[in-house]
Image (spheres, grey):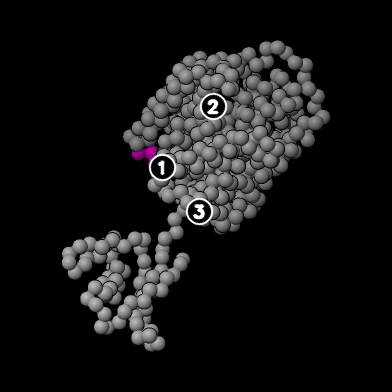
Amino acid sequence: MASNLLHLPGPGCSSREFQPSRLASRQNSPTGILQSSNGNRVFLSPPVRISTRKDNRNNVRALVVTSQFNAPLIAPHDQWGNWTALFAIGAFGIWSEKTKIGSALSGALVSTLVGLAASNLGIMSSNPPAFQVVLGFLLPVAVPLLLYRADLRRVIKSTGVLLLAFLLGSVATTIGTVVAYFLVPMRSLGQDSWKIAAALMGRHIGGAVNYVAIADALDVQPSVLAAGLAADNVICAVYFTTLFALASKVPPEASTPNDGAVMDTGSVSNDKLPILQTATALAVSFAICKSGTYLTKYFGIQGGGLPAITAIVVVLATVFPKQFAYLAPPGEAMAMILMQLFFAVVGASGNIWGVISTAPSIFMFCLVQIAVHLAVILGLGKLFRFDLKLLLIASNANVGGPTTACGMATAKEWTSMVVPGILAGIFGIAIATFLGIGFGLAVLKYM
């Protein structure tokens, strides 16, 4: 804080001099308003702390004014500035995945880290009103957009044995969570320890959206949320490297022309989104969010908004699969943008020193959790005589989600695993929020 020394004349000055008593009264005026002798109001801004002392050398009163003004470059109520920053960070995160470093870290982590740097370096505030719009409205809207393909009947029918391997992987994640929480209890996080453990369990059964939904429902602190995301992404990078190393001895399959036919419903090119489909997808998502929030308020379920929204969209996608599959391509594109905004907010809401001090314990928790998951799914899978490529794709769908499962199956030319891997990942997203919250409240909270 900067300090300035102002010298005010002593006795014998003109009647227009400043009176220390009038200035000192500013200390008791939280609104920054003083009343002058002629009845006019004087506004002082920003707030100042004032003290007077005697200067023996000059026989004058010395007034020390200490400024408390320390504003970020983008003011909290500068709506255009904050939204520009959020969308720029989100776009940078998406673009970064085209680079070697960004693809290794993931766009989500890049957006989180850039947001964290922006707020801690004083570029933007850590809690402007725009953040509340993202958390309260745009994040819930993204959840239905991601799940328009979540037709559970189709998942069960199309995935076959892979679904059993995926469920085995979910059990392996649950076992890994218990073992990791026992070995690395993260007591320094207080009540957030079991909450972040539950969120990471959901993350490694479904995906990032489940991590977010569970953390929101359990009210995890922003710094812990950001630290968990950062630690998890580092461990996942090591995990995927290990997964591809294990897959190196499995040969590619002979390609078949119709492997991707089941996913073609309503598909559009990546660089051109139809206006009507996009508008309809958004309208339906808003309607689902309205229904979910209304039901949670009606039944008094605190923090149940995102789980209720997830349940509604899964039911609708199962009952009306053709209509919702038509809306899926533009919905997923819009959801990607909105999720990047959310990750930027997660980063900007966190304190960098809090993240640094919190991340090591979460890092060790994730390491143990993923190691146990991989050991259990491969061990039990071998016992039940599952093919290795089936177990690897199932584990990938658990930890990484539908996108990474599809990417691995495509890269290894396991063409029969592409669509089942996507559907298994979507199934994980549909169930992981409920599993994470339920297991956290019933088990982890009391460990």
Q: Is residue 60 above or below residue 180?
A: below
Report the front residue among 153 and 343: 343
Quadrant of the rendered structure where residue 100 is? Answer: top right
Q: Is residue 196 above or below residue 290?
A: below
Residue 13 position in % (x across, y down): 26, 80
> Which mark's residue is nearer the viewer, 3 or 2?
3
Q: Secondary structure at mark 3?
A: loop
Task: Check disc 2 and give the amino acid type.
Answer: Ala
Whether residue 314 is visible to the viewer of this picture, yes or no, is: yes
Task: Check disc 3 and give the amino acid type.
Answer: Gly
Residue drawn at x 26%, y 63% as measured from the top left: 42
CA separation, marks 3 and 2? Answer: 31 Å
Residue 156 position in % (x across, y down): 59, 20
Question: Disc 1 designates what residue?
Answer: 79
Q: Which residues are magenta?
A: 300-304
Q: Is residue 50 above or below residue 264?
A: below
Residue drawn at x 36%, y 66% as measured from the top left: 48
Residue 325 lies in magenta, yes or no?
Answer: no
Residue 191 position in % (x across, y down): 50, 53
Mark 3: few/some/many CA within 10 Å (<14, 14-19, 20+): some
Residue 111 position in % (x across, y down): 57, 41
Task: Check disc 1 and give the amino acid type.
Answer: Gln
Q: Earlier in the sequence, mark 2 or mark 1?
A: 1
Dominant secondary-structure state across the stretch colored magenta: loop
CA separation, marks 2 and 1? Answer: 25 Å
Q: Secondary structure at mark 2?
A: helix
Report the front residue among 339 and 88: 88
CA separation, marks 3 and 1? Answer: 16 Å
Question: Disc 3 designates what residue?
Answer: 122
Mark 2: few/some/many CA within 10 Å (<14, 14-19, 20+): some
Question: Disc 2 designates what residue?
Answer: 333
